[in-house]
Amino acid sequence: MATGKWVSTALVLGAVAAWISIFSTVEPRLPAARADGSFYNPCCGFLTLRGGNLRDGNEAVSYVIERDKVGAYVLPNALVSVASKRLDIDRSAYPLKLRLDRERDPSSIEVMDRSNGPAYIFARRDVR
């Protein structure tokens, strides 16, 4: 009977360790400066990324750059999207990933349309 207790305890501890491992694994962070620059879309204007702050001209939100299986992306702390053909920052909504075309020295960033329309591509305007 004592062996059964040890086996049960070992299984529970193993399951707890597995859950801790799963939940403590986060996407790898990349330096915020990798995406620094000004990006432009003719319909929506400028989007500027500088030192961990994303600015649309009027507002600024902080962001991090991470990588997943698809590639690098900017994750702002608010929803950054296009609404009514203009860039919109909504602090009350869940943020979406803004996809970079490449991890190092990106030349464009993809911003989703809030009405589930096609995504907007903001092209880099400054030269590194």
Image (tube, helix red, strand yellow):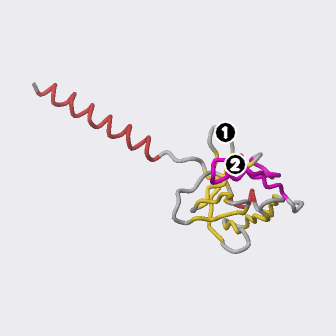
Q: Position of residue 30 (x, y in %)?
A: 66, 53
Amino acid type indicated by mark 2: Arg
Query: Residue 55 appears at what percent x and percent y?
Result: 70, 69
Identify whether 83 is placed above or below 23.
below
Q: Is residue 74 left or right of residue 38?
A: left
Q: Amino acid at mark 1?
A: Val
Q: Decide: is 11 above or below 80.
A: above
Is 9 or 98 nearer to us in this picture?
Answer: 98
List the single residue furthest toward the right.
127
Is disc 2 surrounded by few (<14), some (14 to 19) or many (20+) residues within 10 Å? Answer: many
Q: Nearer the viewer, residue 115 or 82?
A: 115
* Residue 82 percent coordinates (x, y): 69, 58
The tag on residue 99 is 2
Residue 11: name its quadrant: top left
Magenta-colored span:
103-124
Say which residue label 1 marks. 70
